Amino acid sequence: MRVFSGSTRIEAVAPDDRGLAYGDGLFETMRAARGEVPWWDAHCERLQAGVRRLGMVLPDIGLLRAEAAALLAGDDAVLKLIVTRGSDGRGYAPELTATPTSVLSRHPLPPTPPAAGIALRWCATRLALQPALAGIKHCNRLEQVLARAEWNDPAAADRDAFDGLMCSTEGDVVCATAANLFVLKNGRWSTPTVDRCGVAGVCRAWAKAALDAEETRLDVTDVETADAVFLCNAVRGILPVARLGARQWLPHPQVAALRAQLASNHPAFIA
Amino acid sequence: MRVFSGSTRIEAVAPDDRGLAYGDGLFETMRAARGEVPWWDAHCERLQAGVRRLGMVLPDIGLLRAEAAALLAGDDAVLKLIVTRGSDGRGYAPELTATPTSVLSRHPLPPTPPAAGIALRWCATRLALQPALAGIKHCNRLEQVLARAEWNDPAAADRDAFDGLMCSTEGDVVCATAANLFVLKNGRWSTPTVDRCGVAGVCRAWAKAALDAEETRLDVTDVETADAVFLCNAVRGILPVARLGARQWLPHPQVAALRAQLASNHPAFIA
């Protein structure tokens, strides 16, 4: 774990950091292969989009890349970067030139999901519609925390589900708690828009281009009647979905082909 | 500033604290008079409501009260308490028994607002509808940060406004960025409901009882045509509103009477 205030390495995050006070920050979760982060540029572009939206100062990306390389030390790992607005006194009013705080941390790779595909459930927690925050990967994630807490209910169905799908408060299906969603219907791939809630995932952008998928609003029936479904994120890649509640899907050749394509594009995802 | 993991005093907040990662926590901002916090119990009740809602562990309130007293050292000050879910590894899934992190800090009293009343503006940033998080004082506050950032636009009107009123994404008026709202119409006081967004303020509860005010949905016209308007929060007490955009109000005897009643109830608010 390495913490920086601007470009100065510091021992710890200040207790008055606005990340802690208000979730006033952004994060990226990346997959590293042999110490390299193949999607580094895409993650930094999204980070920059978030910085612009929140009116923050971008930290020195070159410094962070060098520090990330030192932290990774040539290994396969998950790399997490949090960038907050730093400390600038009490109150919501942001200081637009505040020195940002950056936290780099490495984590073990997650276990490989089942080859036959993952099981999903529906989350009861809904995503609020907030266009001002949609798409970026900000640190206000209590909705995802509450959705994930639903697994803790001993009476809950599908407690072994790998992830859960979340709908917006208007009922359209948006994403899983920690992944984007793609569905195949009538020979065409689509993924939910993330203009009102949800995150514009780095792997989502890759898959959208690879499949020439359209962005659209999907309802529950669209998902349940799809011919194939997968989740994706930058840490796990393409995750074929085998079950959603009572609905089951057999492995689909197009999803297998996409996984193979990702493996050939991104060394972390070689099976 | 004092930081605790459970009941153990620690040097600093861990960089993997979930407060920093996800805004996964709660806070209270309190006014102390001569080292005492007259509304301590009300703040703790709201904190407990938040802890229940988020499925967190409540820290030792008795310990925090003693530490707060030591930090205040008999002074008039603002006391802030942040309670997060602590550190329990990466990923949204919360550990419901995680040891909470508590941060106590003291701050100078804010300047006294103008005696003739404050000026308000309308914020363009809207509050999303999220019943699962409404009412509690959680740490996902990017909407308030964005609303307050509107003051930084050199072209913005009313840059000298003390605070701004925020509407929900459905258009009803909810609150100011850092205070609750009361309006007088046809001899009856009312304050917006906080069941879909907004915070159930400690001073709001006091004023609601004192005025026998009703909770209701208010639209922009309701506010602009009101006979009197005030904001309130636990740090500043009752704040008469003199202006909202082009609309002006003369001081109202009922607001003055409420301020006097608060001053007689709460020693921090003696004029």
Image (cartoon, coloured by chain):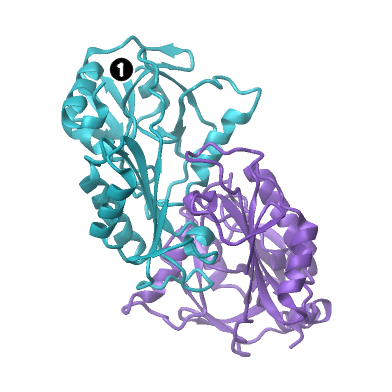
Chain colours: A purple, B cyan
Taking the image as shown, residue A205 lies to the left or right of residue B49, namely right
- At horizontal 68% and vertical 83% (from top left) the residue drawn is A252
Q: Is residue A104 visible?
A: yes
- At horizontal 43% and vertical 70% (from top left) the residue drawn is B94
Q: Amino acid at mark 1?
A: Ala
- Using the rendered view, name the quadrant where residue B185 is placed: top left
- At horizontal 53% and vertical 47% (from top left) the residue drawn is A130
Front residue of B15 and B71: B71
Disc 1 target residue: B228
Using the image, determine if residue A54 lies above or below residue A101: above
Q: Quadrant of the C terminus of chain A?
A: bottom right
Q: Which residue ends up furthest to the right in the rendered image?
A: A264
- Using the rendered view, name the quadrant where residue B75 is placed: top left
Q: Is residue A193 visible?
A: no
Q: Secondary structure at mark 1?
A: strand
Q: Give the image location of residue B203, x and y in percent.
A: 27, 36
Q: Give the image location of residue A223, x and y in percent.
A: 56, 69
